[in-house]
Amino acid sequence: MSQTERNDFIVSPDDLVLVTGATGFIGPRVVQSLLDRGFRRIRCLTRPSAATSKVEALRSLTSGPELELFKGNLLSMEDCLAATKDVAVVIHLAASTGEKSFPDAFMNSAVTTRNLLEACMQHQRLKRFVNISSFAVYTNTGKKRGNLLDETCAVEQSPYLRGEAYCFAKTKQDEMVVEYGQKHDMPYVIVRPGVVYGPGKPAITGRVGISTFGPFLHLGGSNPIPLTYVDNCADAIVLAGLKPEIDGEVFNVVDDNLPSSRKFLRLYKRQVKRFPSLYVPKMISYSLCYLWERYCVWSKNQIPPAFNRSRWYSQWKKTRYSNDKLKTRLGWRPYISTEEGLRRYFEACRAGETHA
């Protein structure tokens, strides 16, 4: 990295950067990206029970930079105060994931984020809080078929109606960060990755379809999948933490040359393993979501509304995606092409690699 690029950052290589969720799927790549840019003081916050082998491996390879491993619980205000002491930039990756309960997701995304923000306010040293959000927060309702989804698009106003704890938690997390930015003049940037993929994350995204006891139900059809290779995503996140004059902005992260759901599934079957699948046309999948939704109402939620029109609009409606803002405002480019990223991903899937 050139000295000119370094001079364009809001902090120096000697300023302390905190990375939460440092042992997750994206975290080690974020730490590596910071090291590649010459940052010498990085604090990696992990849960006490988390496996730390990836961060330890990075630490063993570095000579000079101070890579600190900090074990703590973000639900503890004491731990948050200790983790954010002397920190200039927070890159907040830690969050609740998976199909957990709404209270659990809220506690481990929104409440933990609030604790971090409060701790940063007490120290009064923060130059930027980078909140890692998700495409899951976008509603995608009311837009014409095939329309563009970018940073100006609406987010879910009633996220609980989608029946996804993750969407609910991420929406509330974003709201909290914006509120602190507006009320307390907290400098922040929100980064919303699409589908982050790569070695270590073998599952097929639900935007392609869903597994059943019978054939795989292919719901995406000709829809582009908003993929971003994990290293490209980590690079975008780091730039969002370092570039000047972007406080209060939102950045979507997707790569170039996005494959359709149909193409992705075809490549997966050819290069990883074959399995039976059934394509469900859009009108049928939409109708089934509507009927499921109505039955939930009629039965007083005897069956949770796992499939509903809000989810259909978010995941399976025909949509185009843009990374123009990321390129023009941050100077980001996906240095791993989609072709190369898919090759690496399929190779890892064939080898049966799993994410610890």
Image (cartoon, rainbow, N blue to C red):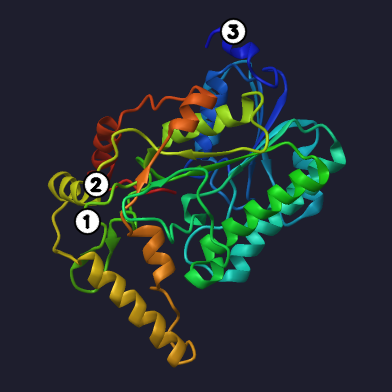
Q: Is residue 316 above or below residue 285?
A: above
Give the class, few, some or many, for how many residues have Cα within 10 Å of label 1's Cα (few <14, many ≥20): many
Look at label 2 and name its amino acid: Ser
Question: Which residue is labeled 1 in the image?
Answer: 221
* Residue at the extreme bottom of the image, as rendered: 299
Cα distance between the residues tagged 3 and 2: 39 Å
Q: Are marks 2 and 1 in contact (CB under 8 Å)?
A: yes
**Callout 2: helix, strand or loop?**
loop
Q: Quadrant of residue 90?
A: top right
Q: Are marks 3 and 2 in contact (CB under 8 Å)?
A: no
317 and 32: which is toward the camera: 317
Look at label 1 and name its amino acid: Gly
Give the class, few, some or many, for how many residues have Cα within 10 Å of label 2's Cα (few <14, many ≥20): some
Cα distance between the residues tagged 2 and 1: 7 Å
Residue located at (63% from left, 63% from top): 106
Q: Name the spot of residue 1 as percent of width and height, x first.
A: 52, 12
Question: Which residue is labeled 2 in the image?
Answer: 260
**Callout 1: helix, strand or loop?**
loop
In primary-sequence order, the first of circles 2 and 1 is 1
Q: Is residue 339 above or below residue 298?
A: above
Question: Which residue is labeled 3 in the image?
Answer: 4
Give the class, few, some or many, for how many residues have Cα within 10 Å of label 3's Cα (few <14, many ≥20): few
Cα distance between the residues tagged 3 and 1: 45 Å
Can see residue 326? Answer: yes
In primary-sequence order, the first of circles 3 and 1 is 3
Residue located at (87% from left, 42% from top): 122
280 and 352: which is toward the camera: 280
